Image (tube, rainbow, N blue to C red):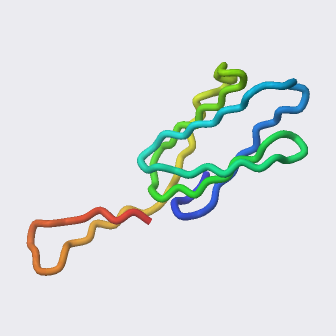
């Protein structure tokens, strides 16, 4: 499990998979930039979510979704409710 604001990572093992295109997509409560690094066993993907919640990770090889996808990454964190100065009814959600 990962926390918002902290780096998270996962490895896609491609040993013995042969040549093909690998695609990774994430959907969740906030946009997430994904960084891919080649490692001995395949590819490591790292990301830093900025908001807590459930993110879906979809991995495709040769445009075919791999078994076990979509995978749900549960990102924990705190959501603060903050009142704007000088107002009575305006509240803003601040995610950490």
To which quarter of the image does residue 6 belong?
bottom right
Q: Position of residue 89 (x, y in %)?
A: 10, 66
Vertical placement of 6 versus 19: above or below?
below
Q: Residue at x 17, y 80 (%)?
A: 85
Q: Residue at x 58, y 58 (%)?
A: 48
Q: Position of residue 14 (x, y in %)?
A: 83, 32
- In the image, 80: left or right of 44? left
Vertical placement of 44 versus 76: above or below?
above
- In the image, 88: left or right of 8? left
Q: Position of residue 38 (x, y in %)?
A: 82, 46
Residue lying at the far bottom of the rendered structure: 86
Residue lying at the far left of the rendered structure: 88
Vertical placement of 1 versus 60: above or below?
below
Closer to us: 35 or 4:
35
To which quarter of the image does residue 62 belong?
top right
- In the image, 86: left or right of 60? left
Vertical placement of 82 versus 68: above or below?
below
How many numbered marks are there?
0
To which quarter of the image does residue 43 belong?
top right
Q: Residue at x 29, y 62 (%)?
A: 93
Q: Residue at x 28, y 66 (%)?
A: 81
For the C terminus, the quadrant is bottom left
Q: Position of residue 91 (x, y in %)?
A: 19, 65
């Amino acid at each position: 499990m990962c926390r918002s604001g902290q780096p998270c990572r996962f490895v896609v093992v491609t040993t013995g998979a042969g040549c093909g295109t690998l695609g990774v997509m994430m959907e969740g409560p906030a946009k997430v930039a994904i960084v891919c690094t080649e490692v001995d066993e395949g590819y490591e993907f790292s990301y830093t979510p900025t908001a807590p919640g459930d993110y879906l990770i979809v991995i495709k090889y040769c445009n075919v979704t791999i078994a076990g996808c979509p995978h749900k990454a549960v990102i924990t964190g705190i959501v603060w409710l903050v009142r704007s100065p000088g107002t009575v009814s305006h509240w803003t959600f601040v995610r950490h």
